Image: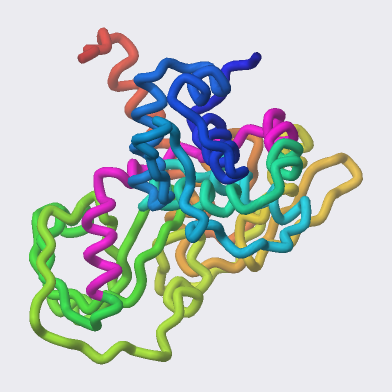
Amino acid sequence: MLKMTRTQRLLRIVQMLQAGRRCNVNKLAEEVGVSRRTIFRDVSVLKDAGIQIAFDDDTETYNIEQSYYLKPMNLTLEEGLAVMLMTRKMADARVLPMVGSIVSAGLKIESALPEDVVKHCGEMLQGVEFDWPQVSDVDSVSDILYRIQQAIANQRKLRIAYESYHEKSEIQTTLRPYRALFRGRGWYVIGHSEMHGELRTFKLERIIALHETDAHFTPDHTFTVETYFGNAWNLIRGDTRYHVEITFSAKVAGNVEEVAWHPTQRTRRRSDGTLVFEVDVDGIDEIAWWILGYGDQAIVCEPEPLRQLIASHARNMLRYVDMHENKPIERP
């Protein structure tokens, strides 16, 4: 028998008990291929997840309380597969807060599905892997994120101490939080900063201290994330809108063309295989960093300020290489 993952093992235990079977520790251990000690730990985990497992002292067996059974759900095979994909493969503690609750909720839903559906979906998922891109670790900010969510719901102002890269120092401000947002590679809070007198974006990893005050605020019901960011390439919205045109070589054209990089992008292929890529963006700093990632496979046609910015970055990179060309690199 193939070794089960922990999620598979927990689900199998729930399925056995939900079927009305009264199983002792030895039977469960034999069924899922682990030790008695592991079964004790698994039962404890399931109880912590809210699954009402009872132990009969007379028979020394486990069972699930009949009152716990969920009402039958008429999920299709595809819907069952989608739920299991989310909870088994996509729930990642690096990205999603409360991932333990997501997994336990998934277990409860799966326990109400027919066993043959769960088995079939589990087999299909064996050939699927999901790997999030490199992101900031949400575990370090999960408490801050939860407190921000509470403040948004309670409409209370927050007092925060923040390591600001823009101000190059630690700042303190009172914030009216409007949205918690995952974008790019990490979690942010968007709100009105009293220190700056305007809406600002704060990365949760850089919040040094956070305190919910007793002061209430009235939310701006006209606020939307889409309006706030406008046509920014990602997170930094500039004051000027630019029409950008870039020609990508045939070597990378397919890679660029197949991704929706920006809501305004338009692309067209030339007969030689090169790709013309056009967007309208508010500010050019972020898109410049993206273009540099393609090196000599990208040519900026317009606007001129972007061409000059790319050239400046390239000169500075070359200057750094020249400065260190004949010097040993000190490694930590």
In the rendered image, the vertical position of residue 326 relative to residue 53, given as above or below: above
Residue 94 visible in the displayed image:
no
Left or right: residue 74 versus residue 261 is right
| Quarter-of-image position of residue 71 | bottom right
Identify the residue at horizontal 40%, vertical 74% (top origin): 239
Residue 268 visible in the displayed image:
yes
* Membership of 143 in magenta stretch: yes
| Quarter-of-image position of residue 248 | top right
Query: Principal SS element in the magenta part?
Result: helix
Q: Quadrant of the C terminus?
A: top left
In the rendered image, the vertical position of residue 274 relative to residue 73, given as above or below: above
- Residue 99 place in picture, x, y as percent: 41, 47
Left or right: residue 91 versus residue 98 is right
190 or 138, nearer to the observer: 138
Boundaries of the magenta span: 122-151
The extreme right residue here reads 271
| Quarter-of-image position of residue 272 | top right
* Membership of 228 in magenta stretch: no
Identify the residue at horizontal 50%, vertical 35% (top origin): 10
In the rendered image, the vertical position of residue 322 relative to residue 147, given as above or below: above
Left or right: residue 110 versus residue 50 is right
Left or right: residue 24 versus residue 245 is left
